[in-house]
Amino acid sequence: MMRAPRFALLVSAAALLTAAGAQAQTATPYQPAGQTTPTQAAPADPNDPSTFTDEELRKYDAAITRVRAVSDTLNGAQPTPEQQAEMAAAVQESGLEVVRFNAISRAAADNPVIDARIRAMKAPPPVPGSVAAGVSEAELTQFVQAMEKIRAVTATVQNGQATPEQSAQLTAAVQGSGLAVDRFNAIAAAVSQDPGLRARAELIGARYQVAQ
């Protein structure tokens, strides 16, 4: 899974870090000109996604979307003072303290759970009465964990032909999921068709991967 790029406001003439998709870099926290370093402390473990509320992530996403809109036009060039001011305003107007924005930015560069949480929050809800709407968190967790095992097996399949042993492992992954085969297949179809359910599954998968 791709890591989210890190964006943080930098001191003076330096600009925000690279646009979306670029490699994460070490950022210097933003400090407005003429002001001393804020005394507010960042969370004890800012890389722990559980320290960020959904509201904070919504504000961060809104700010970073505006930042990317500017940085995508730079093509590697240094931003103008006007562009730098526009990116700084995006953070300052988000409602997040700069220290908190920087903490989320650093964590987003290293932890895919944060990006997955944002996508899950932004995804449309399932259609009422649909299969996707009826999938519980427990069922989706069982499905995702089984799919992790299935992917591990399919990664070893050569030329698209599973050996009898690999076929048995794939079958065991489904049967051991705790879901009936029909229910597993129904959830698989719903995940592929419903963006909201797929975003929830990706969030569970990201948490599973980070926990490994």
Image (cartoon, rainbow, N blue to C red):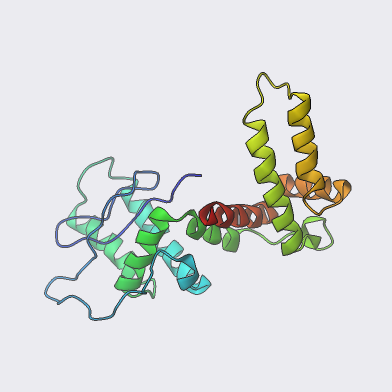
Is residue 194 visible in the rendered structure shown here?
no
Q: Position of residue 38 (x, y in %)?
A: 22, 78
**Residue 51 shown left or right of residue 196 in the figure:** left
Q: Position of residue 85 (x, y in %)?
A: 24, 62
Is residue 55 visible in the rendered structure shown here?
yes
Outermost residue, bottom side: 39
Number of marks drawn: 0
Residue 90, picture quadrant: bottom left
Image height check: is 103 above or below 174? below
Residue at 33%, 75% in the rendered image? 97
**Residue 80 shown left or right of residue 118 in the figure:** left
Outermost residue, top side: 159
Image height check: is 127 above or below 45? above
**Residue 204 shown left or right of residue 111 in the figure:** right
Q: Nearer the viewer, residue 30 or 88?
A: 30
**Residue 87 shown left or right of residue 127 in the figure:** left
Residue at 35%, 57% in the rendered image? 67
Q: Position of residue 195 (x, y in %)?
A: 67, 51
Outermost residue, front side: 165
Residue at 31%, 50% in the rendered image? 71
Residue 74, picture quadrant: top left
Image height check: is 76 above or below 201? above
Residue at 35%, 67% in the rendered image? 103
Image height check: is 79 above or below 92? above
